[in-house]
Image: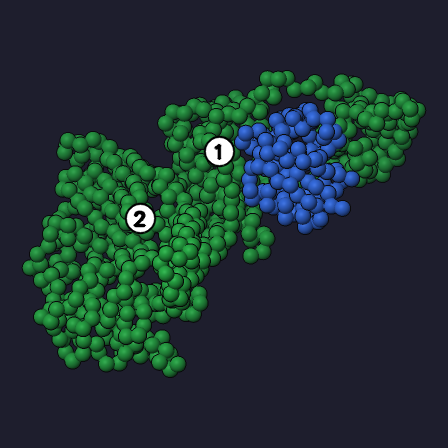
């Protein structure tokens, strides 16, 4: 990535931070914090976005950010009062700003018909304050690159003029880093200059103060630049020098003493009063203490995590080899190894934790979703969050945003009743959506709960029947009915509204969560509300797996997929056709898949009664049974991508390296089952064919 | 020997852009995220030029400039204000605080380098 693209990426990351600051700040203002520093922070957030956007020529974004910033500037200079209508406008503006940033990032555009009303609102708010109009130079804002000598001034008079400039700097000017030579050079750029230096005030060397100013100049300038442009060369030094600028009538020669168009100014500007300095420097109470942090490249962290993964594997290999070498249990080698194991485990946990981030920013993004959906559905909703400080691996957080959004939309659109209905039911006018995150036994549990009407079980059952997702006489528990909404094909025209009907059903959401090695379920209490519960692993880099053997291959089956393990009893296994079997399980039958045959490890089918059967749950919550030869044990393995090192293989999710140094494939249960169900012949798994060819 | 320029801006994007532009022509760049960090960075020695934003948390540009100008170690170090604003009022404040010059964002890299060269010479 070249440098400029990298900075562009930085810019958009920074925009995310600024937008979060903006949201937090506005939320504080809404809660009544009249703190000037909060308003300043909000202003700076928009100001920063505008600045960066200008650099990348993102015009639509710049223009809107400028309108937004103008109102915020008035607010922070107390020319505007923070009224509820103003706050509402600011929230709308913040939402639009976020959308403009996204559009700029993706190269799409936001329709002007969406931008104009908000801009108009902002302009109305800005003008409502009356007399103190924004500074004139900010009107007609245009991002133009600027340099010191190209000052905006009145249009040049084409005719040449003669100007005499008398310039006598004092020492203060030099202290501020200005140099007479440079200024003279600037002047000479404006035309033809004749420069005379007056050294008469220069003392002898012994009396010379190196920081003193003893020189003055007289410059005769022939230029077509307007006088204002000449004045602007001296704009920043005007307080620290004696300056005379006089335009001569064209024919006259300059007089000797034509000086002092401007009155003499004091030698040095008065030092800033203690009050001013205090105001500028006072560390205003920020909302949160600045905890020492450091920005680290995500790539670096990933590399580090990878290395640690290798470390863990190698340490396991070492342990194995040491054991095989036959050291006695009590030997020094064994105990040292145990220490090494402990240390490695701690390093791994520590490194994993660096990528862990609090869910707070994710939850905060949801406040906007809640606002939008509530407005769109005409309901009053408040969002309550718990456990914002809970940390999850960054990669997991990023992939949670969409599913979480859909669940919240669902909760508000379908779960919560309209305010009148709520009042009639004796509930509060305002509905509540509660978002919580907590660590529990090595996983993260995230809940989205609403205090609405709960799932209408009769209707759900009806819909499932109509869509032929369940049998007419199926006996389902209440929980099973609730979870029917996750079946593919469940969402119907009736459940699609203008809000949640953005095309995804709960089945897609569930699959997203499952792709994160998580589980999703719903529980409902009629009249009281529903709760979605998501259970996620702490990280995607390691996996809890069951180590099994199929033929001569060692495989890993993810624990999250396994429902039960059992020895297949004779009477439970029934043949189906020539080669297939089914397993009698919990009052029904589930397909029994010969993993060895499906993956091409063997050709002759395996008698499942001789081995172990794993009952697994796949997407769509249908159960299936996998026949394995043997189970070794259960342990945590480091996931190594197969795609990155080899290529994608159907039925296989990834790989890992076991303690004995061999590669063990990690099964992709869903893909395996789907493939077996399609009755695809084993050779269609190219991997198997290749391995045999070797 | 390359010169050192101190850049003070709370936007990481802006700091990176300045660094890219200035290092590209041989300057050595020191970065600070606000006025306080800027003052801390100055403890390591006077740079050839200071470029600062106005709107920053903790200590803003004006405050920073004033503090630098009070310090005798930094006499004669040019301080350029680099900001999106261009109001006359703000320019005056900067001037009275002791700024050497004012550049409006967004800047073209070549122009910025040109200005710095002229100011630092």
Q: Picture coordinates of residue A392 (x, y %)?
A: 37, 46
Q: Chain B shown in which color?
A: blue
Name the side, left or right, on which B121 lies relative to A83. Answer: right
Q: Picture coordinates of residue A217 (x, y %)?
A: 86, 29
Q: Which mark is residue A290?
A: 1
Residue at horizontal 56 percent and vertical 21 percent from the top: A279
Quadrant position of residue A379: top left
Q: Residues within 10 Å of mark 2 (few under 14, many from 20)?
A: few
Tell which circle, 1 or 2, labels the residue nearer the N-terminal end. 1
Residue at horizontal 24 percent and vertical 35 percent from the top: A431
Q: In which chain is the residue bearing label 2?
A: A
Q: Residues within 10 Å of mark 1 (few under 14, many from 20)?
A: few
Quadrant position of residue A573: bottom left
Q: Secondary structure at mark 2?
A: loop
Q: Picture coordinates of residue A503 (x, y %)?
A: 29, 54
Q: In which chain is the residue bearing label 1?
A: A
| Foreground residue among A66 and A47 | A47
Q: Quadrant of the N terminus of chain A?
A: bottom right
Q: Are marks 1 and 2 on the same chain?
A: yes
Instruction: From the rendered image, report the letter of the chain displayed in green.
Output: A
* Mark in the foreground, 1 or 2: 2
Name the side, left or right, on which A431 lies relative to A67. Answer: left
Q: Picture coordinates of residue A128 (x, y %)?
A: 46, 25
Q: Is residue A489 visible?
A: no
Q: Secondary structure at mark 1?
A: loop
Quadrant position of residue A270: top right
Disc 2 target residue: A442
Residue at horizontal 27 percent and vertical 38 percent from the top: A434
Name the side, left or right, on which A504 lies relative to A231. Answer: left
């Amino acid at each position: 990535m070249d440098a400029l693209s990298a900075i562009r990426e930085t810019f958009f990351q920074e925009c995310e931070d600024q937008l979060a600051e903006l949201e937090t700040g506005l939320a504080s203002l809404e809660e009544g914090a009249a703190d000037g520093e909060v308003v300043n922070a909000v202003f700076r957030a928009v100001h920063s976005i505008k600045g960066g956007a200008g650099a990348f020529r993102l015009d639509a974004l710049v223009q809107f950010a400028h309108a937004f910033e103008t109102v915020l500037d008035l607010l922070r200079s107390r020319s505007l009062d923070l009224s509820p209508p103003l706050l509402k406008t600011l929230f709308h503006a913040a939402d639009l700003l976020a959308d403009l940033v996204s559009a700029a990032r993706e190269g799409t555009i936001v329709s002007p018909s969406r931008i104009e009303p908000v801009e108009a609102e902002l302009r109305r708010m800005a003008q409502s304050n009356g007399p103190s109009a924004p500074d004139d130079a900010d009107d007609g804002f245009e991002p133009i690159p600027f340099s010191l000598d190209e000052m905006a001034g009145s249009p040049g008079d084409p005719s040449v003029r003669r100007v005499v400039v008398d310039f006598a700097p004092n020492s203060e000017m030099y202290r501020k880093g200005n140099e007479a030579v440079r200024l003279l050079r600037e002047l000479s750029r404006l035309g033809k200059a004749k420069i005379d230096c007056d050294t008469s005030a220069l003392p002898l060397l012994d009396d010379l103060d190196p920081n003193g100013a003893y020189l003055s100049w007289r410059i005769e300038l022939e230029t077509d630049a307007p006088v204002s442009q000449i004045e602007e060369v001296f704009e920043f030094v005007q307080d620290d020098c004696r300056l005379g600028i006089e335009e001569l009538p064209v024919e006259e020669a300059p007089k000797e003493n034509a000086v002092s168009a401007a009155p003499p100014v004091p030698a040095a500007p008065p030092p800033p009063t203690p009050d001013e300095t205090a105001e500028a420097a006072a560390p205003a109470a920020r909302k949160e203490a600045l905890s020492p942090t450091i920005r680290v490249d995500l790539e670096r962290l990933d590399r580090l995590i990878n290395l640690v993964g290798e470390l863990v594997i190698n340490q396991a290999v070492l342990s194995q080899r040491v054991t095989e070498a036959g050291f006695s249990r009590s030997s020094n080698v064994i105990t040292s190894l145990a220490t090494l194991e402990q240390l490695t485990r701690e390093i791994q946990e520590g490194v994993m934790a660096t990528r862990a981030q609090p869910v707070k920013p994710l939850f905060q993004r949801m406040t906007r979703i809640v606002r939008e959906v509530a407005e769109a559905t005409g309901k009053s909703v408040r969002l309550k969050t718990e456990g914002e400080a809970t940390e999850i691996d960054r990669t997991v957080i990023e992939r949670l945003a969409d599913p979480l959004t859909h669940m919240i939309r669902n909760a508000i659109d379908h779960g919560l009743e309209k305010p009148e209905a709520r009042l009639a039911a004796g509930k509060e006018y305002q509905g509540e959506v509660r978002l919580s995150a907590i660590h529990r036994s090595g996983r993260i549990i995230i809940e989205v709960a609403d205090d609405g009407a709960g799932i209408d079980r009769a209707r759900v059952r009806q819909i499932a029947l109509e869509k032929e997702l369940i049998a007419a006489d199926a006996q389902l528990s209440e929980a099973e009915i609730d979870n029917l909404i996750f079946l593919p094909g469940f969402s119907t025209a009736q459940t699609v509204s203008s809000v949640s009907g953005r095309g995804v059903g709960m089945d897609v959401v569930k699959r997203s969560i499952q792709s994160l090695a998580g589980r999703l379920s719903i529980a409902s209490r009629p009249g009281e509300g529903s709760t979605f519960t998501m259970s996620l692993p702490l990280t995607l880099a390691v996996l809890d797996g069951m180590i099994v053997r199929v033929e001569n291959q060692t495989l890993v089956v993810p624990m999250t997929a396994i429902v039960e393990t059992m020895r297949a009893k004779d009477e439970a296994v029934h043949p189906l056709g020539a080669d297939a079997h089914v397993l009698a399980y919990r009052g029904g039958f589930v397909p029994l898949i010969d993993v060895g045959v499906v993956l091409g490890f063997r050709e002759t089918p395996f008698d499942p009664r001789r081995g172990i059967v794993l009952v697994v749950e796949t997407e769509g919550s249908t159960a299936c049974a996998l026949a394995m030869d043997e189970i070794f044990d259960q342990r945590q393995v480091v996931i190594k991508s197969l795609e990155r090192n080899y290529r994608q293989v159907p039925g296989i999710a990834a790989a890992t390296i076991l303690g004995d140094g061999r590669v063990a494939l990690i099964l992709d249960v869903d893909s395996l089952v789907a493939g077996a169900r399609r009755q695809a012949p084993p050779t269609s798994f190219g991997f198997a064919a290749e391995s045999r060819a070797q | 020997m390359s010169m050192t320029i101190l850049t003070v801006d709370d936007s990481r994007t802006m700091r990176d852009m300045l660094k890219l532009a200035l290092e590209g022509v041989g300057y050595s760049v020191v970065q600070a995220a606000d006025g306080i960090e800027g003052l801390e960075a100055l403890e390591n020695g006077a740079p050839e030029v200071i470029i600062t934003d106005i709107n920053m948390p903790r200590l803003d540009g004006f405050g920073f400039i004033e503090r630098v100008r009070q310090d005798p170690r930094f006499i004669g170090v040019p301080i350029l204000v680099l900001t999106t604003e261009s109001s006359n009022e703000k320019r005056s404040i900067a001037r009275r605080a002791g700024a050497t010059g004012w550049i409006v964002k967004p800047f073209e890299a070549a122009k910025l380098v040109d200005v710095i060269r002229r100011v630092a010479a």
